[in-house]
Image (tube, helix red, strand yellow):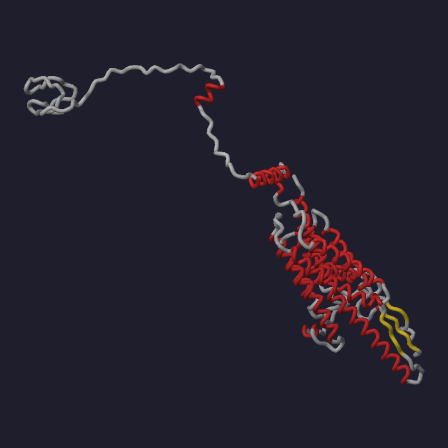
Amino acid sequence: MLCHHCGNDMPLGRRVCATCGETDDLTPPGGGPTVFTIVEQTEIETTPREPWATPEQAAAWYPVTSPPIPSGPTQMSTQMSTEMSNKASRIDPGSELLTFTNEPISTPGTTLLAVFACLAGLITIAGSMLQILTIRSDAAIPQYLGDYTISDLDGVGTNFQIAWLIAGTLMLLGGLLVVQHTAVRFGAGLAGGAGAIIVPLVAFAGFGTNSLTDRALQQAQYVASVGEGGTQFEFTLHVGFFTLFVAAAFGAATLVLAIGFARDDGRVPLTTWLCVAGALGCVVAGAGQLIPGVGARFADNFSNPYSVGAFVVARLAMIAMMVVVGVLGFLLANRFGLGLALGAVSVYTWQWASSLYEWGNLPLPPAIFNPGGDGKPHIVTTLGVVIALVCAARLAMIARRADTPA
């Protein structure tokens, strides 16, 4: 600070200037307000608070503020409070741990799908057991005369009837699982996959019926031409034959209805690499029955002197249906997809196993044959079926474990 008399520097806090010896009265030159004002400190009297306040004192010291209550109608707020209370009453304390394990309580179309799947299954099972054809003639062809069921048809194999029974049983089982709370998606996929696979089966049934009647007629004509008699030939299609076509129609409808359940179900997805391996297994299993044997060509799969066009188309349709539906099912990587894949490969697996181990009189391999084959499934087919089944079994275990609460 500066001395107010001589203007020289003067240390802060000194009252006498070291240069001029005058006493500094802390008043700036020319007068004015003092720079520092000394005020004596005094204590403010306060009312001492007791260590334990009464509720009245606490309310006075810390007043509680609350939002204003609306004066208008409170119907909406009351309704919202009621809804929140109802939701809170339904909350399971452990629901956070089961986020991926709860199946939707109801899914649109569940009842309709269950009805169609069960009807398709029952019709398929009935059609596989009913008589479908009767051949009568006065010609000497006793080997062709009589009643026929689906396992007696020409060129389809004695394991064909069991194939229909398996498809019908799986559709029926899928329809029953659809109405179960914990297996809606898997049941829908199982019914849809089995429904898809019976479409090419009915083509085989039609081909076998037509082939058998044509062969019997040709034999009757030959017998008559050589003078052994015979002027009458007739065949009758029974209700079982038409039942198979109705079953295929219901199976296709079941597949269409089941597609609505293919969306994400909010549960733990299945292991990706197992799903990819299962899809590859389906492709390998289908390709195995296209590999020609000794003395045959790959082109014989599409045209050969021993098979008519309807048989070739039906055979290729069965392979294509199994591959497409099976691959799609595995790659969905959810419970619906797993059921879809199992339904699609079921009949193919039965034909593979029954022909490989020779169950029955004349069990034919998947898709009836491979060109130049010996009546057994190709080794590549065996490899593909085994891969698909192992992956499906492992995925089923993973899905079951993930769906079980800890």
- How far across and how far down the image is residue 159, in percent? 81, 63
- For image coordinates 67% across by 63% down, the residue present is 323
Instruction: Examine the image and state in which quarter residue 160 appears.
Output: bottom right
Is the residue 372 above or below the residue 176 in the image? below
Above or below, 304 against 126 in this view is: below
Residue 265 is at least partly visible in this image: yes
Quadrant assignment, res 114: bottom right
Indicate the position of residue 73 as horizontal and vertical percent values.
54, 39
The reply, left or right, for residue 178 in relation to residue 5 is right
Q: Residue at the far front: name it.
A: 72
Residue found 78% across the figure and 71% down from its top = 206
Camera-nearest residue between 126 and 223: 126
> Is the C terminus in the top left, top right, bottom left or bottom right quadrant?
top right
Q: Is residue 380 visible?
A: no
Closer-to-camera residue (25/367): 25
Which is nearer the eye, 67 or 203?
Answer: 67
The N terminus lies in which quarter of the figure? top left
Residue closest to the eye, 398 or 19: 19
Q: Residue at x 70, y 72 (%)?
A: 301
